[in-house]
Image (cartoon, rainbow, N blue to C red):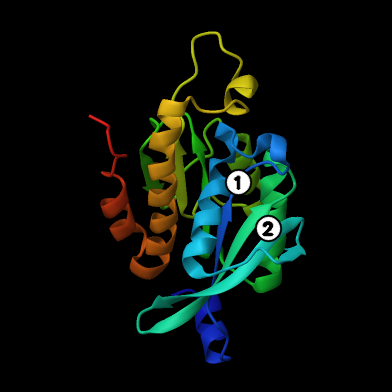
Amino acid sequence: MSIFDKLFRREGGTETYIIAGLGNPGPEYEFTKHNCGYRAADIVAEKLGVSFSKRKFNSLYGEGKVKKNGGEVRVLVLKPETYMNNSGAAIEAAASFYKVPAENIIVIYDDCDVEPGRIRVRGSGSAGTHNGMESCVSHLGTVNFPRVRIGIGKRMPNEDMVKFVLSRFSPEKEKLVQDALVFAAEAAVAIIQKGVDKAMNEANGKKAAGMP
């Protein structure tokens, strides 16, 4: 437990987490590969009975509760509206306002190194080639925060990366991704309730129905 946690709890505060789904605002982006984080955040909100009724920190967000260790913690489900490449600014603003430490910030995003129908949970790590995660690492000043990566698969050789991530899935892959979005939402909540290691062990072996 950090000094911040001890002080916060001694003063009677409520432990707070942020679950942030990365994506781009606007209907034209809604079902693109790059908006898997947004879609998973929608499922988290539905599971927790949270409505995206607040607009602050350049984000849409709602507030709910999750049971943990016999009590409850506060959870902000956040969708930055800064566009993908500046996602970290919105998350940093919310974390600063609510005094949320980096280890309590869970970021959900798309990943082309994971196949559609699968997810990967990690407790820390580099941003890789993902611009949204690069922004998160830059603004939070650390790589030590949990993340849930939703597989979108690799682009074709010589295919433009921007066009690839802003395109939609084929109908066959969309079915796989829908399962993975649920896995991702469940994993984000599990990180809070059970810790990263247990959430990782539970989630990283899952695959969508119909996968070999």
Which of the numbered marks, if any, corresponds to residue 106?
none
Instruction: Give the structural element (helix, strand or loop) at label 2.
Output: helix
Q: Nearer the viewer, residue 91 or 55?
A: 55
Q: Amino acid at mark 2?
A: Glu
Residue at the image point whose x is 50% and y is 56% from the top: 43
Residue at the image point whose x is 67% and y is 36% from the top: 29
Instruction: Give the structural element (helix, strand or loop) at label 1.
Output: loop
| For residue 195, above or below residue 7 | above
Q: Nearer the viewer, residue 109 or 48?
A: 48
- Give the residue at mark 1: 22
**Furthest residue to the left?**
212
- Give the residue at mark 2: 92
**What is the quadrant of the C terminus in the image?**
top left
| For residue 123, above or below residue 23 | below
**Nearer mark to the viewer, of 2 and 1:** 1
Q: CA distance from mark 2 to mark 1?
A: 13 Å
Q: Nearer the viewer, residue 208 or 65?
A: 208
Q: Amino acid at mark 1?
A: Leu
* Left or right: 70, with 19 as reference point: left
Classed neighbour count for the residue bearing mark 2: other residues with Cα under 10 Å, few (<14), some (14–19), many (≥20): many
Expressed as whole percent of the image width and height from the top left, the position of residue 158 reads 55, 8
**What is the quadrant of the N terminus in the image?**
bottom left
